[in-house]
Image (tube, rainbow, N blue to C red):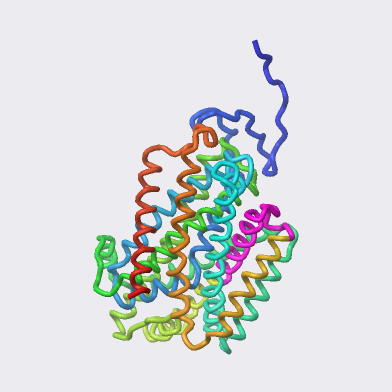
Amino acid sequence: MSQPNNTIPLPDQHGRQADTHQDSSTSGPRAKRRSFLGYLALMGPAFVVGAWQFGPGNLTTAVQAGSRYDYTLVWVIALSTILMIAFTDMSVRLGITTPTSLITSIKDHLGKWVGVLAGFGVFGITLMFSVGNAVGSGLGLSLVFGGSPVLWTVVCTAAVAFVLAFRNVYGIVEKVLLAIVALMAFAFVASAVVAQPDWYGSLEGMVPQLPAGSEILIVALVGTNFSINAAFYNSYGIKEHRRSRADYRDITLVDTIPGIVAPGIMTALVIIVAASVLGKTGAEAGTINALASVFAPLAGPVGSMLFALGLSGAAFSSMIANATAGGTMFSDALGRGAAAGSPTARIFTAVILAFGLAITLSFQASPVGLIIIAQSLTVLIAPLLGILIVIMSNKTALMGDLRNRWWHNLLGAIGLIAIVASSLRLITSLLG
């Protein structure tokens, strides 16, 4: 008969005792009941993911959706949010169960070249996102403070580089992004209230429909709101915090769901505000600047300032999260460390920031068009990442009791079909 284990587990970084029951089910032994601060301590990784996906590209596509097609594309955001929660949840469980980082685990289970390809793919996506972030940061700050958008792009890029220079990179990023998400939530909720939209009409937008000529815009909406690359990175945040199986359900309730639902709601509000402004002023707001300008007669300078603050927060937060994630996962793919503060991760983080700034400075004629193209192209790489998440989440030897259930795989299949269909539609559009 085996002897009982009388070792007293040491408390983790949040003051809770570590979970020593390695193969318990999610309904088995749980950590002791948490205090309010204990629940707050679980918040973070999914909000980093949400901040990454809710960037200027997301806002630009949402503004165009509301301006061109009224409330009819709200359903795309609702569906994308549900699928995003499903894939982020898979990433949470992978972060809990894998003994190493996700890309390293992919190398171990599926082959080294597969992990390296995933890392290169994520790095490519972050380069594309960096363009939208750089353009959006300049537009947002110029709306708030005036001056040249290009100058503010340089200032914002330098500010992000300063934040990422701290030693505890991930911890600093997480705290900054939580604060910015709160600011954005206030800005966009207030903007929606001031705009006084047709709420009944917005609910009708939950019924799926495909307005003529909306295909590429839908692809861009899917690419920004169903961001598999951001979900992929969530496992790294879980590893940074050393979350255990006993944390899983609480993480789902206080981090995964609210962290992903928040940007979904804010995106829907942007569509609703754009549609409302169009309906009441008759002016089309096809760009972020145009929306702010036509919003002024409806809501005054305060309304325009609220929207501009939200845009600035979205640009800054997405720029931080995008560069951090891309640098970290590319470093991991190269076998040079899976921590955001590793030297190799810092180098590639700087490369991502520099790329976005360089492209923005080189192509100033049509910055909003540049955002749409960059965001749409991300769906060409995302299917690979989605397939890898689903495959790894179904490995019983790796996942144990946290492996995918049938409903996880159903949502995973729907998500993969959606992202592959979007990719094929984008390719045919570009070739045509």
Is residue 171 at all visible to an observer of this figure?
no
- 80 or 313, nearer to the observer: 80
Main SS, magenta region, reads helix
Q: Is residue 11 above or below residue 187?
A: above
> Quarter of the image containing the C terminus?
bottom left
- Residue 347 location, x and y as percent? 70, 65
- Residue 153 location, x and y as percent? 60, 80
Q: Residue at x 66, y 14 (%)?
A: 2
Residue 46 in the figure: left or right of residue 214: right
> Hey, which residue is sitting farthest top in the picture?
1
Question: Per the image, is 333 magenta?
Answer: yes
The magenta region covers: 316-343
Q: Quadrant of residue 144?
A: bottom right
Q: Residue at x 70, y 44 (%)?
A: 13
Residue 414 in the figure: left or right of residue 241: left
Question: Per the image, is 233 magenta?
Answer: no
Q: Quadrant of residue 39?
A: top right
Q: Residue at x 53, y 33 (%)?
A: 397
Residue 422 in the figure: left or right of residue 98: left
- Residue 131 location, x and y as percent? 54, 75
- 250 or 73, nearer to the observer: 73
Q: Residue at x 39, y 75 (%)?
A: 63
- 304 or 397, nearer to the observer: 397
Is residue 382 at all visible to an observer of this figure?
yes
- Residue 102 location, x and y as percent? 58, 47
> Quarter of the image containing the N terminus?
top right
- 156 or 328, nearer to the observer: 328
Residue 337 in the figure: left or right of residue 360: right
